[in-house]
Structure formats: structure tokens, C-alpha cells
Image (tube, coloured by chain):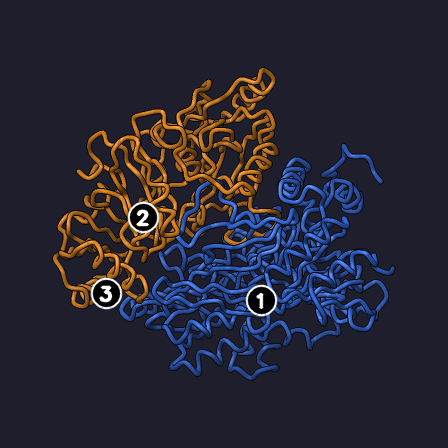
């Protein structure tokens, strides 16, 4: 399909030279994000250099009734930045200025193309940092973090993206500027900043974000505990929190993940353990000491077979390196893998992990678990070989079963990766038609013509009817009253 | 007490929708003063009450909207936890629903975050009688738009809160408040400086020539802090902060209109007559103004916002005016959740 020449000419006029890609070769690198099983080559890629140019792109798209998909670094795991047919891909990578770092007010104001890690690097000389740290933080951009409400390994204590934002300047599809939130902390009117955060590019385009910076902690300690079985490890998570501790990070890995990580980065993990818990504590020296003593005795009491406290920062980083490279490490075990992202109430961790193991066995596909135990945010990695007939379908089916299990125990189908195109089906498991219609209502309020990232994040009721037909559950069809298409 | 009044409430709202009868959502009616004065048939939430779940290992509490805030706080305290945003009650009958709808937070706000940060999920009754569930009882949840947090501070204009799930946190091992004599400008600089450091500050205030700083942590930490910060130990730390939170401190006495200004922490003293009471990291400042005087412009001049918090008259607008595109968006959202415009109409802005 060739793009509308009038649109291309409007965009070219607005953006100047070198900011518009229309040839198939030039557009090819933008055909997917990190969910690379879904690809669609965009017909037009716009690369604005300023907020004003972003606005011009949106206005042109509105004039020509053309869909527009915003994209940051393309590290998203759910296909949120997958181009749409006949649409413009709005790449924000060139808006990469750190506008200000204000240590006195503990904030940084940045353009959307600044990477997550760059913010902390710019803040470090002032003894400050930006807390959310998704594992892709070297590459992922703050614009994408806002769109996905990104998490990381320190969310339980330090919050998600939504907890660390002060103000976002948004360009709307109506061609207007909105300031959501405030550097004063509170803004009058409805709480639109949290509504916008995690909205996956469906409500507007953030062109400037002001984040809260935190003081670097005085002391950090990392404890690694090995367990002989998964359930004991899972139970330790609840015990630590119920005791009154909120660790900075509380991460768990099962045996396949431990072995894969150890083989990949040689980080000193005990390869005979059935489960591993990494518990990071941060804060003031005395408080960290108190917590460190408590956590060690709790872990032993919960049946830990070995404990190790990192002796210095270098060892701490080495111990983290296995966890942080777990996805690629597990990725070496099979030609392909799907990463699930369900979140469950922590009390169900042990049960759910056992059920997943049983499902994995029944499906004949290995599953490795490496996840944010403190948040109850699971990342089962389903290993498969797309080259073998039927295996992709089996892996998808297993993934859907796992997410349905998460919903059944009171959890959610996505804790931090977003819905994108990947989890449109599972969304139908979690929400009924009334909630989905309310989501579409929110979308209408911001984008009446549905031009921003159409077809993502919230499934249509028709799609859920089809999904329900595919996945009849215990004889109960979630959308039985809807006609089938 | 555990009572599910969902069916009755839904019926009342549907009737009101059919007849276009304006409703005024009422929990404990402790915060009737907050927002614009409105008329309407009361939609009483008190009968919908009860704590549904609280498991300390989850750091989550779920309760019905009409549950007394005092009951929730007692339940949490019994297991060594608390609501981290320290909400004001403004009376013994305050409910969870009203607390979340008003979105107000107490002294800890600048350090732990606003109330909305702790909202994990809601079940909400919309203006056209739909019962919708958003969010849940887990810490991380990015499925669908965050409508749960949208309800925090919405003053009931989008829906009545049937159930709310909140993130809760452990009580600190101890607290200590230090008081130091200084002027307003010095206090603002000190609060901002302390907020930048790693000291476990959990509340700050300045009034009548003295700064008050609350720290939380183990005894060893608090001794350390006291050595570094200096000042005098305030004997009744809890009592002092409660008097600010509940506005029983003498500053809040009398009938003069009370203005709340939220401004960037280091904003210079505002051009408003009279000394303020400063809270948080310097970003919440209270002023007593003569009737008829507004603080909107003075707060806006330093990049903040003013709200007429308590007042005797039926003032025209009590919240800072919104820019036109933002107001249009508010109206569009109102139409989606309350198409007949029957829920708390006019409580936030005249035509909303």
C-alpha cells in the first residue's frame, strides 16, 4: 500500500528534510518492537526533532484521518509499537534532550527519547537517581516507560513509573497541549496523570516528562538464599513482608533459570538449588543492619539451605548479573520463548508455581521462572521451537492457560509489559464487556476518532466473543450474549 | 459490621438516572465543606460497609466504601501496618470511600506519595448504574487504563466507590519530631535540603517561627538524626501532627476562609497577606485570607495551584480554573461515566 501523497507532502512540509521515511528499505527496521513474532512494515515513518514537530505530525494525521502509532526505542514486549495498516509511525527517538536536572527540587525534565538509564546517570553527580529500572533500562526511553507504566526490580519499595512522575506535557490528537500533573505535586481537577500513565499511546503523545528523583541510599545490602524446594522459597517471600520489611528488591528464580543464568554469566549461583531468592535492602546504615539481621534469620527459619550476603558492591553486581541476564540466558535453552507477565497475590505464589509446573509437563514444553516475587509479578518463560509443527500454537495455548490461572487467583494478565497486541485475548478473561466498554469510553474522551494506536491495549467486544469461542472455560463462555463474527 | 448494599445503591442510582434527580454522595458527611456547595438527594454509602480482606503478607487492604476510616486504621494497626498517606478524618464518621474520593493526604504526603499512589483497585457505581471493577489487589497491574487511580480525588463526579483496595505499609519502628526556631525562608530552604538527603524525614512543617521535622526509623537511626539535625524533641509527636492533619491546631481556628496552596517546594513566600502554615517539603501552604480575597493568582504566579479549602460562603469556584482543553476533557470523561450528570454535579467545577 502506498501512503497518501497529500499526507506525505504535509508531513514533509512540517518536518523538513531527513525526517520522513517512505521507502520500504528505510521503513523495514521499524516493523516490530521487542515482540518480534508480530511484524508489519510501516508505510511512513516520521522522525520529528521537537515537540512542535510532534504536534504537526498529529495535526496532519488528524486532517487526513490517518492512524498514528508512537514509538520510543522499540523495546516493548507486547507489540504496543507495532505499526498499523495505512498509518504513520511516529518515532520519538530524536527528542532526546535532558532539559533540566534540578537537584534542589529533586526532579528531572526530559524529552521522550531520553533513555531510562541516562536520567539516573545525569542525576548521579547530585547524589540522586530515577528509581524505576526496567531490565531494558540501557535502551528503553522514558516516553515508552510512561506509555507502559514500566516497572523493574525495585518496584515494591520505590514504585512503578506512575509513582515517580510529577508532570507530563501531552500533545493530543486534537492538536492541543495538555499538562497533566504538576511539579507542585498536586494538580486541580481529575487525576489524569495516572490515567495517562500506562495508556500505551492510546490517549496522547507525551513530549516532555518531569520525573521525581530520589536520594541514593546510604547503604545497600544483597542477600542470596538458596532453597531445596520452590514452595519454601515462595513462602519466605510472604514471611519477610508480613514481618514488616519492605525490601528494595525481592526476586526469585527456579532451577531451570538458576542453571541457565549460571551457565551464561558464571555469577556463582548454587546450581543444585530448586529456588533462589535475592533480597536487596537499602536505606540508612542502622536500619539496613536491623533489616539484614532480621531477613537472614527469617530466611533460615523458612528453610533456606544456604545464605550469602554480598561483601561489596562488586559482588552485589555479580549476584544481580545472573538475575538481570536471565531472559537471554534462558533464551539459549531453546530456539524460541514466550515471556508471560501475570501478577498474582503473593499468598498464591507456591500454588501457582506448582500449577504452572504441572501445565508445563502436560503441554510438553519446559517453563523457566524468573520473577519479581515481592510484587507477585511472574515471568514464566515458555520454551519452544517455532520450527516444529504445532509448537507455536501449543506454547500460545500454555501461555493463555497460565494467564487465566493468574486471573482466577485474583491477579492480572500483565503486571508491567502491557497489553499491546499480545494480550488482547487474555484481556477478555480479565474484564467483562462493561469494563471494556468503559475503557473504550476513556479512549473516546481523548481520541474520538480512534486515530492513536488503534486496535491496541483494549480488545473490541467482537474480538472477545471470538476469543471466548476459542477458549470455553468450564462450560462458561465469558461473552455468550454477543453475536459471533 | 459487614453489609453489602450494592443492590440497593444500584437501584437508587438507576432511579435517579431515570428521573434525572441530582444525587449527593454521602459517606460520613465529614468533608461536606470540601469542594463546591451542592444540593442533591443524599446517596448514603454508610450502609455499604465492611473490611473484605486484609492479609499483612500482601500489603493490601480491601474494604467497602462506607467502612469507617477509623475501623480500617485500627485493623491495620493491630497487625503493625498503616495507610502510608496519613489521610485526614475531619470527624469520627469519615469513611474509606469519602477519603479516596476527596484524595486528601496528611503530613507524610511529600515522602510517601499522594493517596492515589496507593489505590490498587476499585469497584465503582457509575452515574448510569453500572458496577465496574478496575485494577485489583496486586501491586503491579497494567491491564487496561488506570481508572482506579482516576477515581482518587474525583469527588464522586464519575462514580460512587463501592469497594477500594489500597496498598498499605508496615508501621515504622519509631518516630521522633524535632523543632527548630527559624523564619519562613530558612524553613523552606531547610525542608528542601532535607528532602534531598537520605535522612528518613516523614513530615515537615513551619508555623509561627518554628520548623517541625518528623523522622522515622529505629532508635539508633533516630539518635543519629537528632545529632545531625539538632533542635528540640517535641514531646507529643503524634499529637502535633494529628493537630495539623485534622486541622485542630490553633492556626486553623476561627471563621476566616482557609486557602490551601500547593506549590513547587522551593517556591518563594507567596504574595498573600498573613503568615502561612507550611507543610510537607514546603509544597503545601495554608493561608487565612479575608472573605472575598482569592489565592488563585498568587499560587499560579509561582507555578502552583490554590484551592479554597474551608469557607463560610457559597463561593463560586473553589478549585483553580482549568485550561480550556483540559476542561473539555473533564466534560468528555464525565459524559462517559455519568451521562445523565446526576452524580455530585458541580462539586468540583460548576458545570461538571
Residue nearest the viewer, comparing B236 with A256: B236
Q: Secondary structure at mark 3?
A: helix
**What tint does the image give chain B?**
orange
Image x and y of residue B113, in percent = 39, 52
- Is residue B54 found left or right of A170 in the rendered image? left
Characterize the local packing of mark 2: few (<14), some (14-19) or many (20 or more) Cα atoms within 10 angstroms: many
Closer mark to the observer between disc 1 and disc 3: 1
For residue B71, above or below residue A19: above
- Is residue A250 found left or right of A344 in the rendered image? left
Q: Secondary structure at mark 2?
A: strand
The answer as to whether the residues below labels 2 and 1 share one chain is no
- Is residue A191 found left or right of B237 in the rendered image? right
Give the CA distance from mark 2 to mark 3. Answer: 27 Å
Residue A261, quarter of the rendered image: bottom right
Characterize the local packing of mark 3: few (<14), some (14-19) or many (20 or more) Cα atoms within 10 angstroms: some
- Is residue A128 found left or right of B276 in the rendered image? right
**What tint does the image give chain A?**
blue
For residue B32, above or below residue A246: above
The answer as to whether the residues below labels 2 and 3 share one chain is yes
Task: Say which mark, if any, is on residue A346.
Answer: none
Residue, far front: A13
Characterize the local packing of mark 1: few (<14), some (14-19) or many (20 or more) Cα atoms within 10 angstroms: many
Q: Which residue is identified by label 3?
A: B221
Residue A298, quarter of the rendered image: bottom left
Image x and y of residue B67, in percent = 40, 32
For residue B97, above or below residue A261: above
Q: Which residue is identified by label 1?
A: A141
Q: Which residue is identified by label 2?
A: B284
Amino acid at each position: 500500500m502506498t501512503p497518501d501523497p497529500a499526507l506525505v507532502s504535509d508531513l514533509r512540509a512540517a518536518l523538513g528534510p531527513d525526517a520522513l521515511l517512505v521507502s520500504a528499505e528505510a521503513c523495514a527496521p521499524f516493523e516490530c518492537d521487542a515482540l518480534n513474532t508480530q511484524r508489519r512494515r510501516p508505510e511512513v515513518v516520521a522522525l520529528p526533532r521537537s515537540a512542535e514537530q510532534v504536534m504537526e505530525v498529529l495535526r496532519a494525521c488528524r486532517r487526513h484521518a490517518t492512524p498514528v502509532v508512537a514509538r520510543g526505542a522499540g523495546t516493548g514486549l507486547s507489540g504496543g509499537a507495532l505499526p498499523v495498516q495505512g498509518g504513520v509511525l511516529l518515532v520519538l527517538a530524536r527528542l532526546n534532550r535532558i532539559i533540566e536536572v534540578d537537584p534542589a527540587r529533586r526532579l528531572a525534565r526530559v524529552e521522550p527519547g531520553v533513555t531510562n538509564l541516562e536520567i539516573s546517570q545525569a542525576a548521579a553527580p547530585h547524589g540522586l537517581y530515577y528509581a524505576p529500572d526496567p531490565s531494558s533500562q540501557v535502551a528503553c526511553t522514558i516516553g515508552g516507560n510512561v506509555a507502559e507504566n514500566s516497572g523493574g526490580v525495585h518496584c515494591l519499595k520505590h514504585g512503578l513509573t506512575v509513582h515517580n512522575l510529577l508532570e507530563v506535557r501531552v500533545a493530543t490528537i486534537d492538536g492541543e497541549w495538555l499538562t497533566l500533573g504538576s511539579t507542585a505535586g498536586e494538580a486541580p481537577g481529575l487525576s489524569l496523570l495516572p490515567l495517562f500513565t500506562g495508556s500505551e499511546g492510546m490517549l496522547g503523545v507525551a513530549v516532555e516528562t518531569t520525573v521525581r528523583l530520589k536520594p541514593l541510599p546510604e547503604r545497600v545490602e544483597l542477600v542470596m538464599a538458596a532453597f531445596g524446594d520452590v514452595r519454601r522459597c515462595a513462602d519466605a517471600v510472604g514471611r519477610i513482608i508480613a514481618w514488616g520489611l519492605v525490601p528494595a528488591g525481592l526476586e526469585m528464580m527456579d532451577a531451570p533459570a538458576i542453571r541457565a543464568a549460571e551457565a551464561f554469566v558464571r555469577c556463582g549461583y548454587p546450581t543444585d538449588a530448586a529456588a533462589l531468592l535475592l533480597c536487596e535492602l537499602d536505606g540508612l546504615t542502622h536500619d539496613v543492619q536491623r533489616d539484614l539481621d532480621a531477613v537472614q534469620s527469617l530466611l533460615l527459619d523458612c528453610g533456606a539451605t544456604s545464605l550469602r550476603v554480598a561483601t561489596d558492591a562488586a559482588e552485589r553486581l555479580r549476584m544481580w548479573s545472573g538475575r538481570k541476564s536471565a531472559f537471554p540466558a534462558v533464551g539459549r535453552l531453546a530456539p524460541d520463548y514466550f515471556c508471560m507477565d501475570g501478577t498474582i497475590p503473593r499468598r498464591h505464589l507456591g500454588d501457582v508455581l506448582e500449577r504452572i509446573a504441572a501445565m508445563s509437563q502436560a503441554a510438553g514444553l519446559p517453563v523457566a521462572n524468573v520473577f519479581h516475587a515481592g510484587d507477585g509479578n511472574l515471568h514464566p518463560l515458555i520454551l519452544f521451537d517455532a520450527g516444529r509443527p504445532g509448537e507455536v500454537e501449543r506454547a500460545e495455548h500454555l501461555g493463555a492457560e497460565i494467564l487465566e490461572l493468574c486471573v482466577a487467583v485474583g491477579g492480572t494478565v500483565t503486571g508491567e509489559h502491557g497489553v499491546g497486541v499480545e494480550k488482547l485475548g487474555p484481556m477478555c478473561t480479565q474484564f467483562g464487556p462493561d469494563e471494556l466498554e468503559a475503557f473504550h469510553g476513556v479512549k473516546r474522551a481523548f481520541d474520538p476518532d480512534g486515530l492513536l494506536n488503534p486496535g491496541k491495549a483494549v480488545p473490541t467486544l467482537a474480538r472477545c466473543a471470538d476469543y471466548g469461542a476459542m477458549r470455553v472455560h468450564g462450560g462458561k463462555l465469558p461473552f455468550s450474549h454477543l453475536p459471533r463474527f | 459490621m459487614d453489609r453489602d448494599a450494592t443492590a440497593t445503591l444500584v437501584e437508587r442510582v438507576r432511579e435517579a438516572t431515570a428521573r434525572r434527580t441530582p444525587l449527593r454522595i454521602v459517606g460520613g458527611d465529614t468533608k461536606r465543606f470540601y469542594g463546591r456547595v451542592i444540593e442533591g438527594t443524599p446517596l448514603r454509602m454508610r450502609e455499604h460497609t465492611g473490611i473484605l480482606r486484609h492479609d499483612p503478607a500482601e500489603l493490601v487492604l480491601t474494604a467497602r466504601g462506607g467502612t469507617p476510616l477509623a475501623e480500617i486504621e485500627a485493623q491495620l494497626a493491630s497487625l503493625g501496618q498503616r495507610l502510608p498517606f496519613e489521610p485526614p478524618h475531619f470527624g469520627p464518621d469519615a469513611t474509606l470511600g469519602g477519603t479516596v474520593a476527596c484524595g486528601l493526604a496528611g503530613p507524610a504526603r511529600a515522602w510517601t506519595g499522594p493517596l492515589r499512589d496507593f489505590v490498587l483497585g476499585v469497584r465503582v457505581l457509575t452515574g448510569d448504574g453500572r458496577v465496574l471493577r478496575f485494577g485489583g489487589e496486586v501491586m503491579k497491574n497494567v491491564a487496561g487504563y488506570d481508572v482506579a487511580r482516576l477515581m482518587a480525588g474525583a469527588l464522586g463526579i464519575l462514580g460512587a466507590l463501592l469497594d477500594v483496595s489500597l496498598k498499605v505499609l508496615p508501621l515504622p519502628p519509631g518516630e521522633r519530631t524535632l523543632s527548630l526556631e527559624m523564619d519562613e525562608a530558612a524553613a523552606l530552604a531547610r525542608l528542601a535540603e532535607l528532602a534531598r538527603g537520605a535522612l528518613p524525614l516523614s513530615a515537615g512543617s513551619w508555623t509561627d517561627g518554628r520548623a517541625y521535622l518528623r523522622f522515622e526509623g529505629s532508635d539508633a537511626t533516630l539518635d543519629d538524626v537528632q545529632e545531625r539535625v539538632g533542635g528540640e524533641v517535641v514531646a507529643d509527636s503524634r499529637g502535633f501532627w494529628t493537630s495539623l492533619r485534622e486541622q485542630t491546631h490553633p492556626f486553623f481556628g476561627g471563621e476566616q476562609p482557609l486557602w490551601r496552596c500547593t506549590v513547587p517546594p522551593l517556591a518563594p513566600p507567596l504574595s498573600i497577606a498573613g503568615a502561612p502554615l507550611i507543610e510537607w517539603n514546603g509544597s503545601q501552604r495554608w493561608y487565612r485570607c479575608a472573605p472575598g480575597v482569592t489565592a488563585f493568582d498568587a499560587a499560579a504566579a509561582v507555578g502552583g495551584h490554590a484551592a479554597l479549602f474551608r469557607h463560610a460562603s457559597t463561593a463560586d469556584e473553589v478549585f483553580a480554573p482549568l485550561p480550556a482543553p483540559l476542561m473539555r476533557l473533564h466534560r468528555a470523561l464525565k459524559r462517559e461515566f455519568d451521562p445523565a450528570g446526576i452524580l455530585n454535579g458541580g462539586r468540583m467545577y460548576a458545570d461538571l
